[in-house]
Amino acid sequence: MQIDPVSLTRELLTFDTVNPPGNEKPCVEHLATLLASAGYDVQRF
């Protein structure tokens, strides 16, 4: 699976990850999905 770095950066910039209040979960889930589809074993803490 090939991911275009510019497209990925654009996608990641759409997530509101300002802390506080800590809205990172949607971004984490998106990255976890991408990594899992590439064969990585993903764990979230």
Image (cartoon, helix red, strand yellow):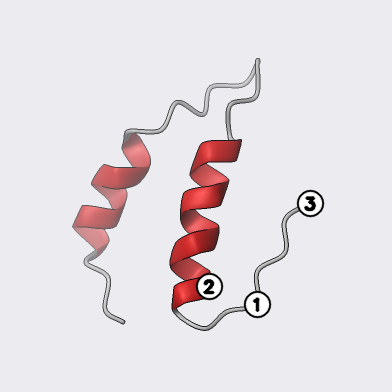
Q: Is residue 21 left or right of residue 9?
A: right
| Rendered position, 39 above or below 17 | below
Task: Tell me the residue at 65%/16% (across/down).
Answer: 20
Q: Which residue position holds label 2?
A: 36
Q: Which residue position holds label 3?
A: 45
Please report whichever mark, 3 or 2, sits nearer to the chain's N-terminal start. 2
Say which amino acid is labelled 3: Phe
Q: Which mark is residue 17?
A: none
Q: Are marks 3 and 2 in contact (CB under 8 Å)?
A: no
Q: SS at mark 3?
A: loop
| Rendered position, 15 above or below 2 | above
Residue 1 position, x and y percent, is 31, 82
Distance between the alpha carbons at the discs numbered 3 and 1: 13 Å
Residue 31 position, x and y percent, is 49, 56
Q: Are marks 1 and 2 in contact (CB under 8 Å)?
A: yes
Judged from this view, the residue extending furthest toward the right is 45
Judged from this view, the residue extending furthest toward the top is 21
The quadrant where residue 11 appears: top left
Distance between the alpha carbons at the discs numbered 3 and 2: 16 Å
Task: Tell me the residue at 33%/37% (across/down).
Answer: 13
At label 2, counting other C-alpha atoms closer than 10 Å, the crowd grade (few under 14, some 14-19, many 20 or more) is few
Say which amino acid is labelled 1: Asp
The quadrant where residue 23 appears: top right
Say which amino acid is labelled 2: Ala
Distance between the alpha carbons at the discs numbered 1 and 2: 6 Å
Q: Is residue 43 left or right of residue 26?
A: right
| 29, 14: nearer the viewer | 29
Q: Which residue position holds label 1?
A: 41
